[in-house]
């Protein structure tokens, strides 16, 4: 990754992403919209996704975010 951001920005983004994904999963669980994992059981594949893929994707997203670009580029990135 090309940018060196302070560690607090990584941790804050990762924890916010985990929090919002957990919150969204809890509210949408009653609609049974997707059935990849059992929501009330701790499984190795669930932990791999939650603690492995979410933080990695979050770090990639904030590292490639065009901070110094025009507003239209930042909006299009999101």
Image (cartoon, rainbow, N blue to C red):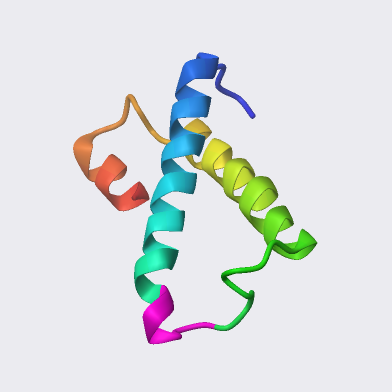
State whether residue 37 appears in this view.
yes
Q: Nearer the viewer, residue 14 or 25?
A: 25
- Which residue is rendered at x = 56% and y = 36% of the image? 59
Specify the quadrant of the image occupied by residue 74: top left
Image: magenta residue range: 29-34
Location of the N terminus by quadrant is: top right
Image vertical order of residue 35 relative to residue 76, above or below: below
- Which residue is rendered at x = 58% and y = 49% of the image? 54
Specify the quadrant of the image occupied by residue 48: bottom right
- Which residue is rendered at x = 41% and y = 65% of the image? 26
- Which residue is rendered at x = 37% and y = 74% of the image? 28
> Most extreme residue toward the left, as rendered?
71
State yes or no: residue 37 in magenta.
no
Q: Describe residue 45's horizontal placement relative to residue 13 as left or right.
A: right
Q: Describe residue 74's horizontal placement relative to residue 32 as left or right.
A: left
Image vertical order of residue 30 relative to residue 17, above or below: below
Q: Describe residue 42's horizontal placement relative to residue 29 as left or right.
A: right
Specify the quadrant of the image occupied by residue 40: bottom right
Q: Describe residue 78's horizontal placement relative to residue 44 as left or right.
A: left
The x and y percentages for residue 57 are: 58, 47
């Amino acid at each position: 990754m090309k940018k060196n951001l302070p560690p607090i920005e990584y941790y804050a983004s990762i924890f916010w992403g985990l929090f919002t994904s957990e919150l969204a999963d809890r509210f949408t669980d009653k609609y049974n919209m997707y059935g990849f994992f059992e929501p009330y059981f701790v499984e190795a594949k669930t932990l791999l996704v939650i603690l492995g893929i979410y933080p990695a994707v979050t770090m990639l997203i904030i590292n490639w975010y065009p901070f110094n670009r025009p507003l239209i580029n930042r909006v299009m990135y999101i």
